Amino acid sequence: MPEYPFPLPDNISDMVNRAANIIQDSPIKDLVNDTVTSVIEQTGLKDRVGDILSSQKAPNIDGAVTMPMSGEESCELLYPGDIIGIKRPLGYEHFAVYSGDGKVIHFAADGTDFGDPYIHEAPISEFLEGQQDFFVLDFSCAHIELDGDTQTLPYDDLPRIYPAEETLERARSVIGENEHGFCKRYDLVTNNCEHFAIWCKTGQIRSYQVGRFLDNLFGRQ
């Protein structure tokens, strides 16, 4: 289990997973998606919201900034082994490893993020789920705030970053013989799609959005 900067209640993982399953298996998900989409379109904020989301840097992912992409045609700009992510209408991010030829390897169910997730290769259309805007994580430099200015750290100062070929090999290995030992049992809190994608690139089993969620839940700074 990944380490967090504070102890987790024993049942927090079960609670979060049960809540996610309830939302996924009920009309709530479609209702929220339809309502958010309708409000954005009717108020003319669709393009503005898209611009805001596309301009956001990757949230607290060590050594990575986001590069916005849009549509399946963006695959021509991706390299096998790239880590890509997408913000869902419900507010969470889903991550995958681009495997080439318009396909991804991700920790998800067939045709949806939840349900019965497993690590598999799928068309990028399954990753997009009808959305257009997504992002690719650029691990070649890290941006930090220092005295009000943005500084760039050299690549050598970052945590270990696997090259694209090895990143993809690690992702494929989990589908097959799993020689690197990544846990295949999905858990929304301790072993989700972000844990998998970041592990493929860095060897670290981390989910930064889970960390932010738990910080907010327990009021930690």
Image (spheres, rainbow, N blue to C red):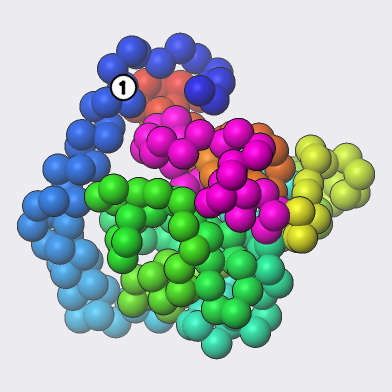
Residue 182: which quarter of the image? top right
Q: Is residue 137 visible?
A: no
On the image, the x and y values in percent for residue 43 come to 24, 78
Indicate left or right for 185 with 16 as reference. right
On the image, the x and y values in percent for residue 86 come to 46, 63
Q: Residue furthest left?
A: 27
The residue nearer to you, when weighing 159 against 55, is 159
User: Which residue is label 1 attached to?
Assistant: 12
* Magenta-drawn segment: 167-194
Indicate left or right for 209 with 34 as reference. right
Q: Residue drawn 60% across and 79% down?
A: 101
Q: Looking at the image, how many numbered discs can be counted on the residues?
A: 1
Report the amino acid beneath label 1: Ile
Q: Residue drawn 60% across and 66% down?
A: 98
Q: Residue drawn 50% across and 69% down?
A: 134
Q: Is residue 120 magenta?
A: no
44 w.r.t. 120: above or below? below
Q: Is residue 203 visible?
A: yes
Q: Secondary structure at mark 1?
A: helix
On the image, the x and y values in percent for residue 45 come to 33, 76
- Disc 1 packing (10 Å; few <14; some 14–19; many ≥20): few
Q: Is residue 184 magenta?
A: yes
154 w.r.t. 220: above or below? below
Residue 66: which quarter of the image? bottom right
On the image, the x and y values in percent for residue 217 come to 34, 27
Q: Residue furthest front?
A: 177
The residue nearer to you, when weighing 86 against 176, is 176
Q: Magenta: predominant secondary structure element? A: loop
Residue 57: which quarter of the image? bottom right
Q: Residue drawn 48% across and 82% down?
A: 71
Indicate left or right for 25 with 111 as reference. left
